[in-house]
Image (spheres, helix red, strand yellow):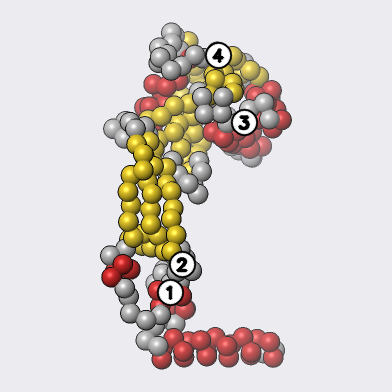
Amino acid sequence: MTDSVKDAALRLIERMAESVAAGRDPPAAAWRRGARPLPARATIGPMTDSEANATRNGPWLRHSRRTAYENPWLTIWHDEVSRPDGSPGIYGVVHFANVAVGVVAIDEQDRVCLVRQHRYAIDEPSWEIPEGGVPPNEAPLDGMRRELREETGVEAAEWRELGRLHLSNSVTDEAGFIYLARKLSQGSTDLEPTEQIDVEWVAFDEALAMALDGRITDALSIIGLQRVALDRLAPRSPEV
């Protein structure tokens, strides 16, 4: 055993002894239980009433939550928190009522169905794969089938889930599902009052180039197209 290894072992033994003397589990025992080490503030002195009534969120403590704004589609929560280092702070969380879904729909000519619509929040037109929001009482795949049919008139006989993701997890709990659709048939659209959509069929390689060069900036679209491209590179990958 080298001197550096001996020194590290001695330091670990000293830390474990200090933890036992203080009535705390040594770090190794805590990790074996799957627990994360508590922030320093939480291990010094008796727990305050505020801490006792708080909700733990990983290394954070949430002392209160109020609704700052809400509408039928989203809620903004204002939380009073203790940060991981024990200092007081606030945290804003955007909660979406619906789950986000998107589909890479590819026809027999290896063309991708893209839609172009104006996005109010960024005040710009956006090229995207067909997307939508699915309410809690509807399965994500069923909602995606409905959105594809309503926006483009397209129906698909073959579906495969490409992935699940969180879209911006520092400020929102919004979750998303991306699908691949094949064996397509064309019907009629059923647009909502908020939708004014142009549909275009683009060769897959061109759609991927659009995701790489900035013509497509929508996150679900970029991830979906790149996932299909990666699957095509994988040996013995399913038909994509």
Please give the residue where the numbered disc 4 appears in the rendered image. Answer: 199
Residue in the picture at 34% in, 32% down:
71
What's the amino acid at mark 2? Answer: Ser
Q: Which of marks 1 and 4 is nearer the N terminus?
A: 1
Q: Residue 150 carries which label?
A: none
Q: In which quarter of the image is the C terminus?
A: top right
- Callout 3 secondary element: loop
Q: Nearer the viewer, mark 1 or mark 3?
A: 1
Q: Quadrant of the N terminus?
A: bottom right
Please give the residue where the numbered disc 1 appears in the rendered image. Answer: 41
Q: Nearer the viewer, mark 3 or mark 2?
A: 2
Residue in the picture at 63% in, 17% down:
202
Q: Nearer the viewer, mark 4 or mark 3?
A: 3
What's the amino acid at mark 4? Answer: Val
Please say if 230 is above or below 20.
Answer: above
Res 138 → quadrant? top left
What's the amino acid at mark 1? Answer: Arg
Residue in the picture at 28% in, 70% down:
49
Label 3, label 2: how many angstroms apart (C-alpha)? 37 Å
Q: Which of marks 3 and 2 is nearer the N terminus?
A: 2
Label 1, label 4: how many angstroms apart (C-alpha)? 56 Å
How far across and down, in percent of the image, does residue 78 sit?
38, 49
Please give the residue where the numbered disc 2 appears in the rendered image. Answer: 87
Q: Residue 217 carries which label?
A: 3
- Callout 2 secondary element: loop
Q: Are marks 2 and 1 in contact (CB under 8 Å)?
A: yes
How far across and down, in percent of the image, does residue 181 sit?
50, 25
- Callout 1 secondary element: helix
10 Å neighbourhood of mark 4: few (<14), some, or many (≥20)?
Answer: some
Label 4, label 3: how many angstroms apart (C-alpha)? 17 Å
Q: Which of 90 and 156 is in front in this view?
A: 90
Q: Do the residues labelled 3 and 2 touch (CB within 8 Å)?
A: no
